[in-house]
Amino acid sequence: MTLIFAHRGSSGTHPENTMLAFKEAARVGADGIEMDVQLSKDGEVVIIHDEKLDRITGTPGFVSDRTLKELQTLNAAQSFKGKVAKERIPTLEELLIWLCNNHLFCNIELKNTFFMYPGLEEKVIQLIRAYGMEERIVISSFNHYSLVYCHQLAPEIETAPLYRDGLFMPWVYARAIGGSAIHPSIHSAPDRIIQSSMKAGILVRPYTINKKPDMERLYGLGCSAIITDFPEKAKKVRINFEN
Ligand code: G3P
Ligand code: CA
């Protein structure tokens, strides 16, 4: 059965990358969650998508220029102001502690293409190991050098290259960099690529799958997982594909 990963949590209905959005994903029965991590100025692994703070928090400046304490004074639910109470930017550790109490899979995307964040890989892996989450985590990134490094540091943790533009034989490429899955944009995930990858033993988790026809196509193919902003909707659509 195709698994459902909630993109930045249930971000279509709740403020992205907040504990509120992750808890909503669990509540509606998602199989996993996806999130984005960066480093604060004082080297803490924080969960936030953009390198700039303005879209998420309404505050100027970069994530990397603020300490954790400073970041946690901001409201990560700024775009839902008036609808939900203030939400802190979570740390990866906070999320992993919460994951200890459920069975969700977790896709940690390293946001290290704009800023490289030296030490991010080591810190993320140290946290995953500290909480014994190796079996439930996949690390992804658009920075494939970083994924190779992760695989060298922790071959027991799954890695998956993210990509937007079509790759030739991505299952071969994924293996070459130590990956066991691919995370293509929906625009780079035609049927034949999904089928060939899965046949070669490479899992396929396209993003961001929000439309019913796209969900139906991927469920029909038995695609490994989808990454969606709307896990509740994805669950409802999946019912027709369950045996
Ligand atoms: O992991 C899938 C997707 O999150 C990658 O793109 O920009 O939403 O982080 P983005
Ligand atoms: Ca992401």
Image (cartoon, rainbow, N blue to C red):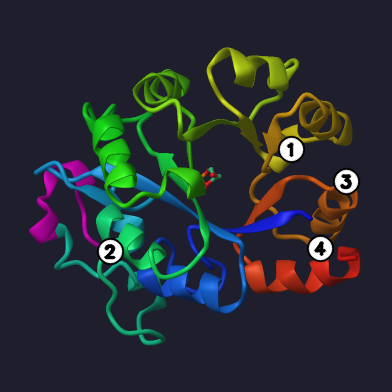
Find the distance from the CA under tag 3 to the CA under tag 2.
41 Å
Q: Amino acid at mark 4?
A: Lys
Question: Between marks 3 and 1, how big is the CA–CA gap?
Answer: 16 Å
Quadrant in the picture for the C terminus? bottom right
Q: Quadrant of residue 238?
A: bottom right
Position of 90 with respect to 190 (left or right) is: left
Q: Amino acid at mark 2?
A: Gly
Q: Nearer the viewer, mark 4 or mark 2?
A: 4
Q: Which residues are magenta?
A: 58-70
What residue did someone put label 1 on? 187
Of the numbered discs 2 and 1, the one sitting upstream in the chain is: 2
Q: Is residue 80 above or below residue 210?
A: below
Q: How many angstroms separate mark 1 from mark 4 (CA)?
A: 15 Å
- Taking 29 as reference, is 224 left or right? right
Q: Which residue is mark 3?
A: 221
Q: Depth check: 175 or 156 in front?
A: 156
Mark 1 residue type = His
Q: Is residue 63 magenta?
A: yes
N-terminal label among 3 and 4: 4
**Label 2: element kind:** loop
Q: Is residue 101 magenta?
A: no
| In front: label 2 or label 1 | 1
Q: Which residue is mark 2?
A: 58
